[in-house]
Image (cartoon, rainbow, N blue to C red):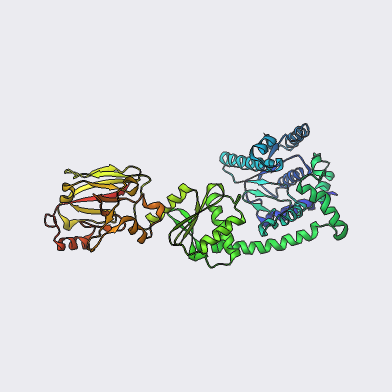
């Protein structure tokens, strides 16, 4: 490869990377193993930087997995010399991949990949914090990696996402060399006279990737020629299809997604009748937003979610998901979460309906206040209980979280602010103006309150009767001007005294 061809390599990488926005950042960290691919990536990026075609600062990160005694240390030393010669900052990390693989019951290859990518992310975050610049991690995957990965994933039964992999950019990971073949990279390095390490294990047929690279592909080439050529064409065609489907799926997800007090959920009617392929991507998008990754979310889990979405659900349903997580359906709401988060979501649904919830048991006696307003912190909640005597009922200000109780009711017996988690008694409520009462749990069913939230909903009770259920109504006294007039017209005891206690629940 002559000088002209060397420049063409730089131009090719620059054009490809600019078309994908790979260099739209302040710092690029090169994953530098010392092998030909990563060394070529290092020199290409450094060459573009020296030519001022890119203005990103260049750093390097080397992970020594200590899987090949002696050879790994030699590669680390080669990388140190390379970065020193080119005045590039280098961070070297040492890992015990063998032990990590044993502890986590995974292959040493998988262990190395997991540890590497964790190290990349941690280093990138540290650099961003220290410099204030956006950091991306450059990985040396090339065209041949596309072919190998595509065939490996095809025989694993992968869908489009697996066949269009690796991608030019995924999160902060960028792959500027996907436009070049392995042979172009080694020719480039040989032309420059640059040293690089050869991992002898890559020349064997041990491991799935090496089998495809060193055994299967050469046999295919005997009949069809270089398999990378047609597979790369297929990759590009599938990439266009995936981009279109992903864009449509993003629109469908945004249309079906809503936030319940900051918690992402899907509206069942917004996704229920969608095509199965679109529904699959929308469900996975929700899982990804909720947990940050798609690890171990498999076809069986997806099929369970389909059934949960498509069924006629009368109440609250939970299904087991990986890592102890749950799929949740309540009426129009479909969500994912841990058991604690699901209960929190159920409480948010109740709050969204206007009810007030606590985080645990509540049982707080309400006393007749003195001459001034009293304020008491409600246990296990974000609320304060305020009480104040009211004598002039014609100059009141009302809100959804205030109730006016005749002072006689407070004086005649114990009144308690609580929830079902704080009492074991059967409770009933007779709404003002109603002819009959209803058991509390039945009432909450009628009001479509998630079962997981019912024990946390706050109310005021006396003996076994609920006198006020914020968000629903009252059985005694009044909550606004209309109910005041009805209360006075009813001629109930205390109506003529004109003295009430305003009981209010306010957020801290």
Residue 440 picture location, percent across and down: 31, 55
Q: Nearer the viewer, residue 492 or 242?
A: 492
Residue 253 in sight: no
Count of numbered circles in the view? 0
Pinpoint residue 374: horizontal percent, then vertical percent: 23, 43
Which quarter of the image is occupied by the C terminus? top left
In terms of depth relative to the viewer, which is nearer, 236 or 489?
489
Find residue 199 and report its image quarter. top right
Q: Position of residue 143 (x, y in %)?
A: 76, 53
Q: Residue at x 21, y 51 (%)?
A: 502
Residue at image point 60% right, 46% down: 134
Would you place residue 96 above or below residue 332 in this image? above
The answer to whether residue 154 shows anywhere in this view is yes
Which residue ends up furthest to the right in the rendered image? 222
In the rendered view, does 363 fall on the left or right side of 36? left
Quadrant of the rendered image containing residue 80: top right
Q: Is residue 71 left or right of residue 110?
A: right
Residue 326 is left or right of residue 300, and the answer is left
Residue positioned most to the left = 496
Q: Nearer the viewer, residue 229 or 218?
A: 218
Name the residue nearer the viewer: 279 or 82: 279
Image coords of residue 156 (percent x, y):
71, 54
Task: Tell me what residue is drawn at x 18 percent, y 47 percent.
Answer: 413
């Amino acid at each position: 490869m002559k000088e002209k061809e060397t420049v063409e390599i730089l131009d090719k990488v620059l054009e490809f990377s600019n078309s994908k926005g790979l260099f739209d950042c302040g710092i690029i960290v090169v994953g530098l193993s010392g092998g030909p691919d990563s060394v070529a990536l290092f020199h290409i990026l450094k060459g573009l930087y020296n030519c001022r075609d890119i203005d990103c600062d260049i750093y390097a990160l080397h992970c020594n997995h200590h899987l090949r005694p002696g050879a790994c240390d030699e590669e680390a030393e080669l990388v140190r010399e390379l970065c020193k010669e080119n005045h590039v900052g280098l961070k070297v990390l040492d890992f015990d991949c063998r032990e990590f693989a044993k502890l986590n019951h995974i292959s040493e290859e998988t262990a190395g990949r997991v540890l590497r990518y964790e190290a990349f992310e941690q280093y990138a975050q540290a650099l961003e914090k220290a410099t204030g610049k956006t950091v991306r991690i450059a990985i040396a995957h090339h065209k041949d990696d596309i072919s190998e990965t595509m065939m490996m994933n095809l025989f694993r039964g992968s869908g489009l996402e697996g066949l269009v992999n690796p991608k030019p950019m995924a999160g902060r990971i960028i792959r500027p060399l996907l436009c070049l073949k392995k042979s172009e990279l080694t020719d480039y390095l040989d032309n420059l006279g640059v040293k690089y390490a050869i991992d002898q294990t890559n020349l064997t047929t041990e491991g799935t990737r090496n089998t495809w690279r060193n055994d299967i592909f050469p046999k295919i080439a005997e009949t069809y020629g270089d398999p990378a050529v047609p597979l790369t064409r297929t990759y590009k065609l599938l990439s266009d299809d995936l981009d279109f489907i992903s864009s449509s799926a993003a629109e469908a997800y945004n249309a079906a997604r809503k936030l319940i007090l900051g918690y992402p959920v899907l509206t069942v009617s917004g996704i229920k009748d969608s095509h199965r392929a679109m529904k699959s991507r929308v469900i996975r998008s929700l899982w990804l937003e909720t947990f940050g990754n798609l690890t171990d979310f498999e076809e069986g889990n997806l099929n369970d979610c389909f059934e949960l979405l498509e069924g006629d659900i009368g109440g609250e349903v939970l299904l087991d998901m990986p890592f102890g997580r749950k799929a949740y359906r309540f009426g129009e709401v479909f969500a994912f979460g841990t058991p604690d988060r699901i209960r929190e979501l159920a409480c948010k649904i109740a709050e969204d309906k206007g009810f007030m919830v606590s985080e645990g048991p509540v049982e707080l006696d309400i006393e007749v206040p003195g001459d001034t307003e009293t304020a008491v912190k409600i246990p296990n909640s974000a609320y304060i209980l305020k009480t104040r005597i009211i004598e002039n009922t014609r100059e009141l200000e009302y809100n959804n979280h205030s109730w006016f109780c005749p002072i006689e009711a407070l004086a005649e017996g114990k009144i308690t602010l609580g929830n079902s988690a704080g009492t074991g008694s059967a409770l009933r409520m007779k709404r003002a103006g109603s002819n009959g009462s209803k058991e509390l749990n039945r009432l909450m069913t009628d009001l479509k309150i998630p079962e997981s939230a019912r024990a946390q909903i706050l109310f005021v009770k006396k003996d076994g009767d609920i006198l006020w259920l914020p968000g629903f109504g009252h059985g005694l006294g009044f909550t606004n001007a209309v109910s005041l007039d009805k209360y006075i017209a009813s001629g109930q005891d205390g109506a003529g005294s004109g003295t009430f206690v305003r009981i209010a629940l306010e957020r801290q």
